[in-house]
Amino acid sequence: MRGKWAAGIAPKHFTWIFKDSLAVSERPGGFTANHRRVRRQEEIIWLESQHFTKIVSLLGTPHNLAAYDEHKLASSSFDIPLIGDPHEALLACFLELNRSLGAGAKILLHHDELSDVTLGVVAGYLVWSHKASSGPQAIAITERLTTRPLGPVARTLVAASLELEPAPSA
């Protein structure tokens, strides 16, 4: 591959949460009806060229996981329920993020779109991991970084995060 596409293209709505450690975007290749295999390939090439080492999917389905494996990118998938109790899934996701970030991984976190689910998980992780001192501060930080407002689903996930056993102190 030659030219400007040789290094791939960044996933849509790519945003750093922790510079060079944790980023968010929509699903590589695009969301559901707009998903394109070629675009997914280009975006995964870009992730590789940027030295990402892990993808954390919030889809709860195996979409894209085989493509990540094909490129030797470690991946995890968590199904964050929008109806019912999200506590167990949030805690498992937060523990995985904490472990991976602590081990020096460069992580992309995504859902189908950069929506309330992803933003709620990010804000919840900020407060759970003691990076933010309160739910409102975590929400404000997430809104500022992503330039997107957090809606009711995201705020519900942040509230659920506050009910979890906090992360071990560093």
Image (tube, rainbow, N blue to C red):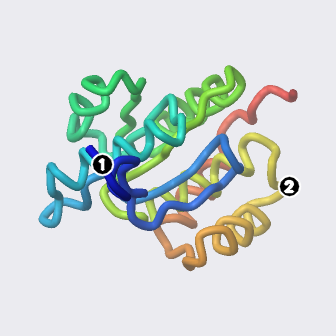
Q: Residue at x 67, y 44 (%)?
A: 20
- Say if 126 sits above or below 168 in the image: below
Please name the residue shown 49% across and 73% down the image.
152
Q: Residues within 10 Å of mark 1 (few under 14, many from 20)?
A: few
Which of the pair 132/104 is nearer the observer? 104
Residue 11: quadrant of the picture: bottom left
Residue 93 position within the rendered picture, expressed as x and y whole percent measured from the top left: 52, 35
Where is residue 140 drawn, in percent x and y?
73, 72
Number of other residues with Cα within 10 Å of mark 2, as a class: few under 14, some 14 to 19, many 20 or more: few
Picture coordinates of residue 81, whole percent (x, y):
36, 48
Q: Amino acid at mark 2?
A: Ser
Front-most of residues 43 and 163: 43
Amino acid beneath label 1:
Arg
Q: Quadrant of the C terminus?
A: top right
Disc 2 target residue? 133
The image shows residue 117, relative to residue 47, as above or below, that is: below
Work out whether residue 39 or residue 136 is closer to the camera in this orientation and state it. 39
Quarter of image, res 13: bottom left
Q: Position of residue 62 (x, y in %)?
A: 22, 34
17 horizontally vs 65: left or right: right
Q: Is residue 137 left or right of residue 43?
A: right
Compared to residue 162, the image places residue 88 above or below, namely: above
| Mark 1 touches mark 2? (CB < 8 Å) | no
Local secondary structure at mark 1: loop
Number of numbered discs visible in the structure rendering: 2
Residue 107: name its quadrant: top right
Provide the residue designation for mark 1: 2
Say which of 141 and 151 sits in front.
Answer: 141
